[in-house]
Image: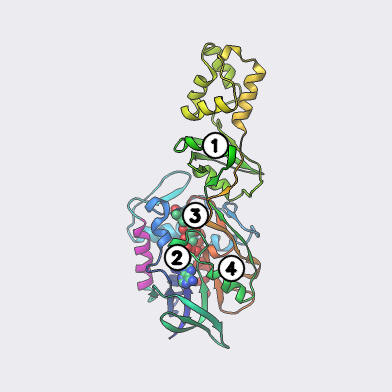
Amino acid sequence: MKWDVLVIGGGAAGLMCAIVAGRRGRRVCVIDHANKVGKKILMSGGGRCNFTNLGVTPANFLSANPHFAKSALARFTPDDFIALVERHGIAYHEKELGQLFCNDSSKQIVRMLLDECAMAGVQVKTSCAVEQVRKSDEDFVLQTAHGEMRAESLVVATGGLSIPRMGASGFGYALARQFGHEVLPTRAALVPLTLSGKHLDRYRDLAGVSLPEVEARVGGQAFRAGMLFTHRGVSGPAILQISSYWQPGDDLRVDLASTLGEGWLSERRKQHPAATLKTVLVDALPKRLAQRLCEVWFDNRPMRQYTDAELRDVECRLHDWPIVASGTEGYRTAEVTLGGVDTDGLSSRTMASRHVPGLYFVGEVVDVTGWLGGYNFQWAWASGCAAGEAA
Ligand SMILES: Cc1cc2nc3c(=O)[nH]c(=O)nc-3n(C[C@H](O)[C@H](O)[C@H](O)COP(=O)(O)OP(=O)(O)OC[C@H]3O[C@@H](n4cnc5c(N)ncnc54)[C@H](O)[C@@H]3O)c2cc1C
């Protein structure tokens, strides 16, 4: 079977690329080894798919080349995707911080993409594993579970390594290497952090305790959002965000009292001199956490017994709480994979390989990783579109 464009991977990036190429009149086929396409779209955003973010800028992405994503992001914007969603009559809302979710279900986004594929004449083959890829003089030749398939252009849209049970594989990286591309080291990102030893013993039984707003910091990067204690460590949006910037051994600090101004404890001492520190902390923190901090870190006396310096010290520690993480929960639960196909080998306009004419890499397989909040899908749509216009 001979096609103009073969797309390996029917996720967000692959489907978008196929649609755009198909609309140009290219004969396109999407191949996926999973039994249905768009599985990550279906499970995303708690089943409501956070499909984009109104505030997307290149600064919301991590890559060895921070400029690489600019061109594609500028040419397919959140407004372009919103227009598509609206054309399909899908109701959506902004949850917070520019994050757009479907009102009803992620299934609507997959349905929309498949309808667009059908309108653009794109064929979609599921349960079709690709066994081997080679380049002949003119074509890419794929040995697949459905026989040999050939195409002038090959788009690799196989995603990252996160959630292997959803079909994630390292196939895209292997293909990149086969065709002479560098693959930068990968690691799980947007992922809960784990604690061990005494650090876990101290907080393990707080599992389920959450704080609506903390500031998590590593190096020069900081995120303000919620945090959650788990049986194995810490999670919640602030931790997931900072996990993309954290590596074992890095000094991770959390401001547990980010909404409280300087001197608030001295103020409370004036108002409630007989109250204990723990009682006062319960106004600002979840009760079980306040109690634990008083057991582990602070001695719990009536407020009037604390000097100004001691209260300043308590405040400082709350604003600069060290989390000694031992690792992450890994690809099993990570939302994305950092690293991947080195952008040095790709055109930022078209996602085309600089080494092999007709070869393209799009979406998460490329070394571009977004923050939590719809950024990763926007990269998938934008990079898919960039390749779809050229492939
Ligand atoms: C639980 C979860 C929730 C998420 N929620 C959000 C969210 O709300 N908003 C957001 O922006 N991002 C979210 N993400 C991230 C987002 O899903 C990904 O960044 C995005 O799906 C990447 O798109 P992609 O097309 O590059 O890869 P994928 O969507 O992973 O698609 C890759 C496709 O390639 C197929 N494939 C893999 N290997 C092969 C092979 N060897 N042969 C054939 N096919 C193959 C896979 O089956 C899959 O269909 C979430 C991720 C997870 C895991």
Residue 40, x across and y down, in percent: 43, 60
Residue 252, x across and y down, in percent: 62, 41
Residue 82, x across and y down, in percent: 42, 57
Tell me which numbered mark, 1 or 4, is placed earlier along the sequence. 1
Between label 3 and label 4, give the one nearer the viewer.
3
Q: Which residue is mark 4?
A: 349
Q: Residue at x 45, y 48 (%)?
A: 99
| Quarter of the rendering containing residue 370 | bottom right
Tell me the CA gap for discs 1 and 2.
Answer: 35 Å
Q: Nearer the viewer, residue 238 or 187?
A: 187
Q: Which residue is mark 2?
A: 167
Q: Which residue is mark 1?
A: 201
Residue type for callout 4: Arg
Ligand 1 under 8 Å from disc 3 Cβ:
yes
Between label 1 and label 4, give the one nearer the viewer.
1
Specify the label residue 258 is tagged with: none
| Quarter of the rendering containing residue 224 | top right
Ligand 1 under 8 Å from disc 2 Cβ:
yes
